[in-house]
Image (spheres, rainbow, N blue to C red):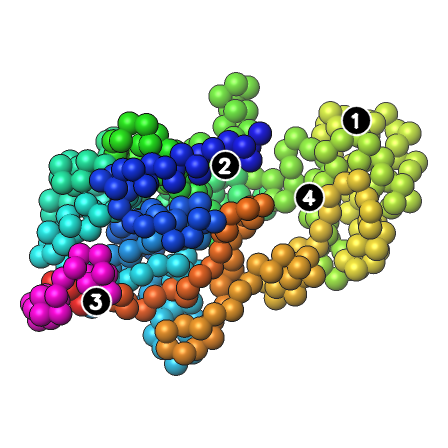
Amino acid sequence: MLQILYLRTKYLLNIYITKNRKYTCTNIKDDKSPLSGIRVLDLTRIVAGPYCTMILGDLGAEILKIEKPESGDEARKWGPPFIQGTEEATYFLSVNRNKKSICIDLKKGKDIIYELAKKSDVLVENYVPGKLKKMGLGYEDISKVAPHLIYCSLTGYGYKGPYANRPGYDMIAASIGGLLHITGSKNGPPCKVGIAVTDLATGLYAHGAILAALYQRMTTKKGQWIQCNLLATQVASLINIGSNYLNANKEAVRWGSEHESIVPYEAFHTKDGYMTVGTGSDTQFLDLLKRMHLIELSKIDKYKNNKTRVENRDELLSILRKKFETKTNKEWAIVFEGASFPYGPINTIKQVFEDPHINYMKMVQEMEYSTGKKIKVIGPAVTYSYSTNKVRCAPPVMGQHTTEILKNILNYTDDKIEALKKVKIVQ
């Protein structure tokens, strides 16, 4: 059913692009890329916005990354580490593949943005609310010159409310939104997650919202303003923890790697590391006991179902933890081979990229950077039976495609481009 819906959507989108050039401005060059023919103006920096546009780029959209002359995206300098022999941070590489970089002074080059907007389908930005409006680049301004454009704003806290004008960073939104309160060891201080998960989730929300708006535009032929923010994303991501409080008045606490509602479900210390095991059903728990030679525990009433196991967690976990310490991760992996319950070692990052299954999925791809250096990127997580979702080109150096974009999309002459460069409107 989903495949039929996808093929119908793709068919309608192709017809729409062909018949409505006024609303969709780029040519179809690869009919296997779901977003081939879609052009995105990317006015984002750091993580959430660039992650969103990178996903769109993987799906075939043409991403024009608009950067500030001289400095560019702040993440370019977020190092060390840097690409060997350059001052380009590896941080920047992680969220900026499949993009073209053009450097434009937004204040002086507002008219260039207008012209590009007319020939684009989507604009994504993550400035503090009101900043682009002061430059004449807010949604109201852009919609007048490009009413077909999907304009997506990613902010820290939204456009209204007590925090609206605050700059938004992942960890601050995660703090206010409760994630740090529930993250960390049981009796320890709050702890941030190892990656910017609130940023990433906001980018994912934004990418889905953009696709929905593009689909709706096929019928309405109208653009619209999408607003995503870090704090709303974080609160929406509280799922069961939020529901526990709202419906049972249960305040959350930190559980470390344990699970509040499922026992056992945690990272157990082994002879040489940690092994994470979870049993989401009584059948899985029985399988665990058989494999660990603890079948006698299945005859004890207080361990017979998940409810009683949660109520008697401390005693049961004490027994399991002692048993786990008798073998190494590799030895437990042999014991658990073919198990009905999920399990896995806590890998170092080195071990992650040496993992046979991760290598089988070909998650890591190598390409040549513009400097000639070989770089590696982590590829898309989603595969399609027919469509392509792939890494096509390395992240750009700052301003790498300025001339190309101005000439090929806006038909500027060489003289006009040189004149713009001289007065530092573009770089």
Residue found at x 66% / y 30%: 261
Task: Name the kind of residue labelled 3 in the image.
Answer: Thr
Give the Cα separation between the discs numbered 3 and 4: 54 Å
Give the Cα separation between the discs numbered 2 and 4: 41 Å
Asked if residue 214 is positioned above or below residue 425 in the image, the reply reads: above
Report helix, strand or loop for mark 3.
helix
Would you say residue 72 is visible in this rendering? no
Task: Determine crowd level at label 4: few under 14, some 14-19, many 20+ residues with C-alpha closer than 10 A.
Answer: many
Q: Position of residue 133 (x, y in %)?
A: 14, 42
Find residue 9 and report its image quarter.
top left
Asked if residue 217 is positioned above or below residue 134 in the image, the reply reads: above
Report helix, strand or loop for mark 2.
helix
Task: Name the kind of residue labelled 1 in the image.
Answer: Asn
Residue to which mark 4 is pinned: 266
Residue to which mark 3 is pinned: 403
Q: Earlier in the sequence, mark 2 or mark 1?
A: 2
Report helix, strand or loop for mark 1.
loop
Residue to which mark 2 is pinned: 7
Asked if residue 380 is positioned above or below residue 364 in the image, the reply reads: above
Q: Position of residue 218 (x, y in %)?
A: 33, 32
Q: Earlier in the sequence, mark 3 or mark 1?
A: 1
Residue to which mark 1 is pinned: 305
Residue found at x 22% / y 48%: 119
Give the Cα separation between the discs numbered 2 and 1: 45 Å
Q: Quadrant of the N terminus?
A: top right
Report helix, strand or loop for mark 4.
strand
Give the Cα separation between the discs numbered 3 and 1: 67 Å
Task: Name the kind of residue labelled 2 in the image.
Answer: Leu
Q: Are marks 3 and 1 in contact (CB under 8 Å)?
A: no
Q: Quadrant of the C terminus?
A: bottom left
Q: Are marks 3 and 2 in contact (CB under 8 Å)?
A: no
